[in-house]
């Protein structure tokens, strides 16, 4: 009887003090399988330390897609080149293919050359690769060693380029500036080390910006946004970060709002407008933390008349803000906040606006219209004017506009052509381009060549009308 009593007391004691959920953690959007933060290599990366030239190459092509969302930040190609309406019997005319490290980084195109920041998983390095637009052969490569663990891919940013400079941001917040003509290294900055930046979920998704030969970067940490001289690497100005906002996957977008040029950045913590003019560059003009999701990927979109559209995934939905100017003072108020089933929203890609109409792909939690391509008026983002049908859903894929047509990429690398219309979804053709998956990387187009990728392969498609 004594033994039974002792066992019973022991069982009761274990039951009373044991926490059955002690090993469980809260499920936070975006934190699935995120690698632990590695501080051991924080100061060991030598940015841009290695270089190799593969061949001498010059091109007569002059087309440009120089940054994330193209020359005018709107994801619209304005070259006067007639493009195809249908793929034809043979399917897409693929000019070349190049293998890539797993990720979603997008390319830029400049005067017949393609530039992409890749990750070589076998050699463990971030690599800026220069590739011929005409034949896909690699021209040169500038790289540096950095250990990155797979986390829904690795690289996912788009460089910024002009005649003299190309700027990249690697998965672990390493900024590199090179000469795009020959690959010469100009400078590098480790944002984690220099600004105490928190590396975002799934690594860096922010794409850099070059404005008047100044690299515009949003580190978070000790400085919300900073302007860096591309020629020297010298910091020209810094925006303070008293609210300790953190780097998001969203990119800085320049906008001219109420006769003031601003850099608009949506960080983890809030959105702000920062002066982009010489007299007060870097000064915070206005900010808001009212709509503050935990995961932010799409960039802010200017609707005109002082209105800005912002959206995020994981059920966050979207918001429309109104920037107001009273005398010389700017402020902002919230016009709308709504859930994804109640209007235009996006999880990963930034919508396209043209002639006061907005086009985009609804997120997975948008109800019966989830993942469909849709159109709405910029005057009312909650009123969807048309959608693609249920047979045409596009997941997290990117889209681009050229020659009055949309080129829309599905997750599984099926590429759709649709005619621009404000009255209905005008499907033209579609074709499976690659056999891969997670085709989420931003596309680029110049000289009638469309660049797209899945998680491990980039292809160049000739979309010129024959």
Image (cartoon, rainbow, N blue to C red):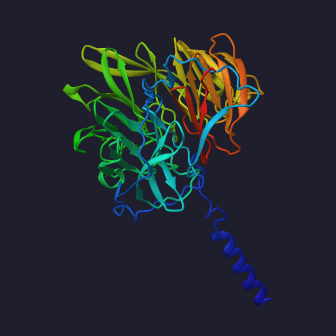
Dividing the picture into quadrants, the one containing residue 436 is top right
In the rendered structure, the answer to whether residue 438 lies left or right of residue 230 reads right
Expressed as whole percent of the image width and height from the top left, the position of residue 71 reads: 42, 26
Q: Residue at x 35, y 19 (%)?
A: 256
Q: Residue at x 48, y 35 (%)?
A: 292
> Is residue 362 visible to the viewer in this orientation of the structure?
no
Q: Residue at x 48, y 43 (%)?
A: 131
Q: Residue at x 72, y 24 (%)?
A: 429
Where 201 falls versus 108 (above or below)? below
Residue closer to the observer: 192 or 149: 149
Expressed as whole percent of the image width and height from the top left, the position of residue 175 reads: 36, 48
Residue closer to the observer: 263 or 288: 263
Q: Looking at this rendering, what residue extends furthest in the left direction?
A: 279
In the rendered structure, the answer to whether residue 429 lies left or right of residue 175 reads right
> Is residue 366 visible to the viewer in this orientation of the structure?
yes
The quarter of the picture where the C terminus appears is top right
Expressed as whole percent of the image width and height from the top left, the position of residue 28 reads: 57, 48
């Amino acid at each position: 009887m004594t033994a039974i009593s002792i066992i019973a007391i022991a069982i009761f004691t274990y039951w009373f003090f044991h926490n059955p959920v002690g090993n469980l953690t809260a499920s936070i959007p975006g934190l699935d399988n995120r690698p632990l933060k590695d501080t051991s290599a924080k100061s060991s990366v030598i940015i841009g330390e290695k270089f190799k030239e593969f061949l001498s190459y010059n091109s007569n092509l002059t087309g440009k897609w120089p940054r994330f969302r193209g020359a005018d930040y709107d994801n619209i190609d304005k070259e006067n080149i007639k493009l195809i309406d249908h793929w034809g019997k043979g399917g897409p005319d693929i000019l070349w293919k190049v293998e890539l490290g797993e990720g979603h980084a997008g390319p830029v195109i400049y005067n017949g050359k393609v530039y992409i920041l890749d990750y070589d998983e076998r050699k463990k390095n971030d690599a800026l690769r220069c590739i011929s637009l005409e034949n896909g052969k690699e021209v040169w490569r500038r790289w540096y060693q950095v250990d990155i663990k797979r986390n829904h891919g690795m690289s996912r940013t788009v460089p910024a380029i002009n005649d003299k400079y190309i700027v990249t941001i690697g998965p672990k917040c390493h900024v590199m500036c090179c000469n795009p003509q020959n690959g010469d290294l100009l400078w590098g900055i480790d944002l984690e080390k220099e600004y105490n930046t928190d590396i975002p979920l799934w690594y860096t998704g922010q794409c850099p910006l070059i404005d008047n030969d100044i690299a515009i970067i949003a580190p978070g940490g000790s400085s919300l946004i900073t302007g860096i001289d591309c020629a020297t690497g010298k910091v020209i100005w810094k925006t303070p970060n008293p609210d300790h906002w953190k780097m998001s996957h969203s990119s800085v977008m320049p906008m001219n709002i109420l006769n003031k040029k601003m850099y608009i950045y949506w960080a983890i913590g809030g959105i702000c407008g920062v002066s982009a003019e010489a007299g007060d560059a870097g000064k915070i003009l206005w900010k808001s933390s009212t709509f503050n999701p935990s995961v932010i990927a799409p960039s802010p979109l200017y609707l005109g008349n002082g209105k800005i559209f912002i959206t995020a995934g994981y059920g966050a939905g979207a918001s429309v803000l109104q920037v107001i100017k009273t005398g010389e003072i700017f402020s902002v108020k919230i016009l709308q906040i709504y859930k994804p089933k109640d209007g235009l929203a996006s999880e990963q890609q930034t919508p396209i606006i043209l002639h006061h109409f907005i086009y985009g792909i609804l997120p997975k939690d948008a109800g019966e219209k989830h993942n469909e391509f849709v159109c709405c008026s910029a005057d009312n983002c909650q009123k969807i004017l048309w959608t693609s049908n249920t047979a045409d859903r596009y997941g997290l894929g990117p889209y681009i506009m050229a020659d009055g047509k949309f080129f829309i990429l599905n997750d599984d690398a099926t590429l759709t052509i649709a005619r621009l219309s404000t009255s209905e979804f005008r499907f033209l053709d579609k074709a499976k381009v690659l056999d891969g998956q997670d085709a989420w990387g931003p596309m680029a187009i110049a000289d009638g060549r469309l660049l797209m990728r899945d998680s491990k392969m980039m292809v160049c498609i000739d979309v010129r009308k024959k």
